[in-house]
Image (tube, rainbow, N blue to C red):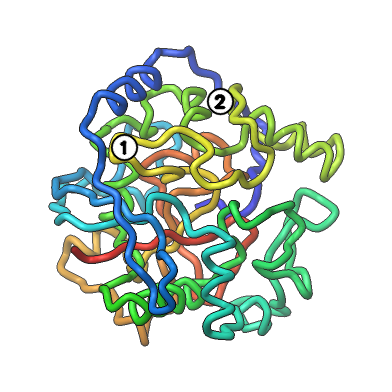
């Protein structure tokens, strides 16, 4: 995951190939995904969930894929059982309801230390320049990006995300959790095997993913100055959103899920472990012992190469960034 705006100067150039349009047509022709909502203890509705069918997915990227990182290999195939996944990322409004019900205080608001970092307080956000830094007093409530309750919640640590899904479980009596890495990549790919979920062309992503693009460059210029538009690599399409977008603003994928790539990166329930060690039989650490968790989906501030399906990154569980949020999963 790229938790800060890209600093690369090279832009991505690729001829349009029509694959995004074909995927949109296929999604429209596919049977509608089953959506449902659980009821919270106070009678209010929980997040909208989509039933994701069981299947198999090839995790990772081949050596030949442009932009590939070592953490994306070796490629291997796994089975994924049927499960439910949030139709969208958790919104500010949904997270605010949790805070009102429980009085929860996030890691950013408590200035919780981050391992191997000094002077960590608030959230890691762009402050007066393209390069982010820790900003005292910033949190999911306000971190320098204009948002309302329809936008995805951000500046959320893994601890905060885990607290939210645990509350959902208690409030509904259902088995809510954070999705596994395999579930995340399965949901991102939605049957695709190309570098990007929508095909081979990064510029086709503006129909599906809010990433660094024409609107992002305009936002960077207005917020951080002319130099940012020189340094900010982006796609050559326009998703219409400079920073975070209200959830479900763009097209859904073949599973009926929105924003599986872009908008905000999403915490995984899995402790981060290299694929090679997983394949050798090593098990991820238990929740109490895990220090760093996987991040998937990438964000509004990420250049096209970081929006590929196989991208996986890690962050300490107390980290909170201006472009990291969450999506819920639930056992069926």
Query: Looking at the image, which is closer to me, 102 or 202?
Result: 102
186 displayed left or right of 158 = left
Where does residue 195 sit, x and y in percent of width and height?
Answer: 36, 32
Q: Is residue 32 above or below residue 139?
A: above
**How many callouts does the rendering have?**
2
Task: Give the residue at x 50% y 17%.
Answer: 14
Task: Give the residue at x 41% y 47%.
Answer: 311
Q: Splitting the image into 4 quarters, where does residue 275 fall?
A: bottom left
113 displayed left or right of 129 = left
Mark 1, Cα crowd under 10 Å, few <14 / some 14-19 / many 20+, is: some
Task: Give the residue at x 14% y 46%.
Answer: 55
Task: Give the residue at x 38% y 23%.
Answer: 200
Mark 1 highlights which residue? 63
Q: Residues at badges 2 and 1 in contact (C-beta under 8 Å)?
A: no
Mark nearer the N terminus (2 vs 1): 2
User: Helix, strand or loop at disc 1?
Assistant: loop
Query: Looking at the image, which is closer to me, 156 or 164?
Result: 164
Quadrant of the drawing holding the C terminus: bottom left
Mark 2 highlights which residue? 12
Q: Is residue 290 above or below residue 221?
A: below
Nearer the viewer's eye, disc 2 or disc 1?
Answer: 2
Q: Which mark is residue 79?
A: none
Where does residue 10 sit, x and y in percent of width and height?
Answer: 63, 29
Query: Looking at the image, which is closer to me, 35 or 62?
Result: 35
Q: Splitting the image into 4 quarters, where does residue 321 fall?
A: bottom right
Measured in 3D between alpha carbons, the distance from the residue under mark 2 to the one under mark 1, in whole angstroms, is 19 Å
Where does residue 160 sit, x and y in percent of width and height?
Answer: 51, 75
Query: Looking at the image, which is closer to me, 164 or 138?
Result: 164
Q: Is residue 201 above or below residue 171?
A: above
User: Helix, strand or loop at disc 2?
Assistant: loop
Mark 2, Cα crowd under 10 Å, few <14 / some 14-19 / many 20+, is: some
28 displayed left or right of 148 = left
């Amino acid at each position: 995951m790229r938790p800060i705006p890209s600093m690369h100067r090279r832009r991505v150039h690729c001829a349009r190939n029509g694959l995004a349009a074909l995927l949109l047509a296929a999604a429209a022709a596919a049977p509608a995904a089953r959506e449902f909502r659980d009821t919270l203890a106070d009678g209010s509705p929980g997040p909208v969930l989509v039933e994701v069918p069981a299947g198999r997915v090839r995790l990772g990227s081949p050596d030949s894929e442009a932009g590939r990182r070592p953490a994306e290999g070796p490629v291997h195939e796994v089975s994924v059982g049927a499960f439910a996944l949030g139709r969208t990322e958790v919104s500010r409004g949904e997270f605010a309801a949790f805070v009102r019900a429980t009085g929860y205080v996030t890691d950013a608001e408590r200035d919780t230390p981050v391992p191997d970092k000094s002077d960590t307080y608030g959230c890691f956000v762009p402050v007066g320049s393209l390069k982010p830094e820790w900003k005292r007093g910033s949190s999911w409530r306000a971190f320098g990006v204009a948002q309302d309750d329809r936008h995805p919640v951000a500046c959320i640590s893994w601890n905060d995300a885990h607290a939210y899904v645990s509350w959902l479980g208690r409030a509904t009596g259902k088995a809510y959790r954070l999705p596994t890495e395999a579930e995340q990549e399965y949901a991102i790919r939605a049957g695709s095997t190309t570098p990007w979920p929508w095909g081979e062309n990064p510029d086709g992503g503006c129909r599906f993913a809010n990433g660094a693009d024409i609107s992002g460059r305009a936002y960077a210029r207005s917020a951080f100055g002319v130099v940012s538009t020189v340094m900010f690599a982006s796609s050559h399409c326009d998703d219409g959103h400079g920073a975070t977008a209200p959830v479900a603003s763009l097209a859904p994928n073949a599973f009926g899920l929105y924003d599986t790539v872009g908008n905000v990166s999403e915490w995984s329930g899995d402790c981060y472990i290299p694929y090679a060690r997983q394949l050798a039989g090593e098990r991820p650490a238990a929740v109490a012992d895990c220090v760093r968790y996987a991040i998937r989906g990438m964000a509004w501030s990420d250049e096209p190469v970081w929006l590929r399906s196989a991208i996986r990154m890690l962050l300490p569980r107390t980290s909170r960034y201006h472009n990291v949020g969450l999506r819920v999963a639930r056992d069926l």
